[in-house]
Image: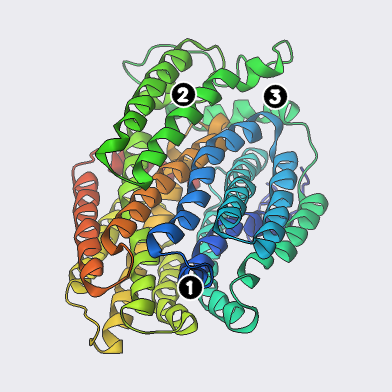
Amino acid sequence: MTDAKAGGSGAGTDQPGFDRGLLPPMLLGSVLNPINSTIIAVALVPIGRALGAPASQTAWLVSALYLATSLGQPVVGRLIDVFGPRRLFLLSTGLVGVAGVVGALAPGLGVLIGARVLLGFGTCAGYPAAMALVRREAQRTGRDSPGGVLTALAVANQTIAVVGPLLGGLLIAVGGWRATFALNVPLAVAAVLLGMLRLPKVEPEAGRETGSETGSEARPEARPEARPGAEPTAHPTGGCTRRGSLAARLDLPGMGLFAAMLVSLLLFLMNLHLRDWYLLALSAAAGAAFAVRELRAATPFIDLRVIGGNIPLLATYGRALVAYVVAYSFLYGFTQWTEEGFGLTPFHAGLAQIPMFLLAIGVSVVSGRNTSVRGKLLLGALGQIAACLLILTLGGDSPLWMLLLVALIFGVPQGLNNLALQNSVYFQADPERTASSAGLLRTFAYIGSMVASSATAASFGHHADTGGLHRLAWVMLGSGVLYLLLTLFDRTLGRAAGTGTRASA
């Protein structure tokens, strides 16, 4: 890791500042997933028309990416915790370029779905790698919370969300929907080059031996033995020594059981029907076997002993799931309705999303330096509920300003929730498992997106009409109310916020 001073972080002190040279690959890697998420929102209708596929089938283009990413984020995060971010970042972002080529040349919907799966795996490393680099820089500089960097990550994702629908509409207008996949090729090339030039080459084991003690002392409450009533357990990386085999360090059986549990669950959620009950039973059985395995493993893939004793982190994961049910239902369902039910072109549907994302950027920037989360989460929940209630009043003859008002209201929770959830995980997670904990946050978010995708497909069927939009709005409203209740009755939020504030001081 370089010792370059960062402007602002270390100015006027003897401590080194955050290495700003890491920011370009961190930011570009972390936005590869959201840019593909938002571009596809305006491409679903043109793809369906070109390939003769109804909305219920093109929904798999959304589900496929999130299925792959839900599985890949914690796995890649664990690999980053063990091997460091550089190798995984380069391999994953290179795969994004391959997926872009496959998607641009896809002859049919099946191959196109396969390209989205590749994109899902390819975009897995960006966010966990960024969070791991933030943690390492915090240990190196002695400054536990580079709040400006965490805010930059959130704002970068919001900015891409602004650009995504509009850029998608422009690409479709100029080069057709295939151009939205081809865009990944130059993005991947840039990410790989930046990663090769900027990411540190230091061995992760050496970095942990010199820096992990500082991180553990700085955040004792993240260690299970420091929490009242928690049973002593092995240090999260204690079994990950050079004496152990590669398989033992990675817990390959645990990864396999986790994959079986998650894939069967998400396949059930993608197409909710009683005839597929066996998928839910398979998920439950794999989940039980996974729990038994992880509780007995010396170096578990996901340390359930640590997470099980970390109630604030579990609550954050639950909030992420329901928050993203609302967010992704709006992103995909509302966008499809503006094209099919309201009559906008893909380009104009992208423009209609801009008020939401512009306000989200402003909200993230203004609130970013304050690490407390309770107020952000409460206001975010109320914003979601208000927007859902307004959607229930929309129809095909509604004035355009009402659509823009809905998007504007959604900008408040969009800017607050992402930042609050990200900051929560940074402060609540075990420092030695920052990348895998960040990956799990995205996994719960993508499970929410799968529920949203399934709800969107079930609500619309073959056509995104106003009746389907209202059915979807009721699902969103119920999720928003649950999100509010999870926040109101979570007494750990005050303590978590206090910890974060002290850490960043």
Front-most of residues 106 and 494: 106
Query: Crowdedness of circle 2 by 10 Å Cα count: few (<14), some, many (20+)?
Result: many
Task: Say which quadrant the N terminus sits in.
Answer: top right
Q: Which mark is residue 174?
A: none
Q: Is residue 130 above or below residue 256?
A: below
Asked whether the viewer can see residue 259, the reply is yes
- What amino acid is found at the position of numbered circle 3 in the picture? Glu
Verify CB contact (< 8 Å) between mark 3 and mark 1.
Answer: no
Q: Position of residue 500 (x, y in %)?
A: 42, 44
User: Mark 3 vs mark 2: which is more N-terminal?
Assistant: 3
3D distance between C-alphas at marks 1 and 2: 53 Å
What x and y, as percent, mark residue 378? 25, 56
What is the distance, in whole Å, between disc 3 and disc 2 at their CAs? 17 Å
Q: What residue is at 70 percent from the left and 49 percent from the top?
A: 95
Residue 505 visible: no
| 38 vs 206: above or below | below
Q: Position of residue 9 (x, y in %)?
A: 63, 56
Looking at the picture, how far across and down is residue 317, in whole percent? 37, 40
For label 1, the SS is helix
> Which of the labelled discs sits on residue 209, or is there none?
3
Residue bearing mark 2 = 223
Q: Name the residue nearer the viewer: 309 or 126.
A: 126
Q: Sequence order check: which comes first, mark 3 or mark 1?
A: 1
What residue sits 18% from the left and 71% below the top? Answer: 392
Proximity of marks 3 and 2: CB atoms separated by less than 8 Å: no
Amino acid beneath label 1: Arg
Return the disc, 1 or 2, that comes first in the chain's sequence: 1
Q: Which residue is mark 1?
A: 49
> What residue lies at 35% left-to-right and 43% top-to-bottom?
269
Colour scheme? rainbow
What is the secondary structure assignment of the residue under circle 2?
Answer: loop
Q: Residue 179 vs residue 463: left or right?
A: right
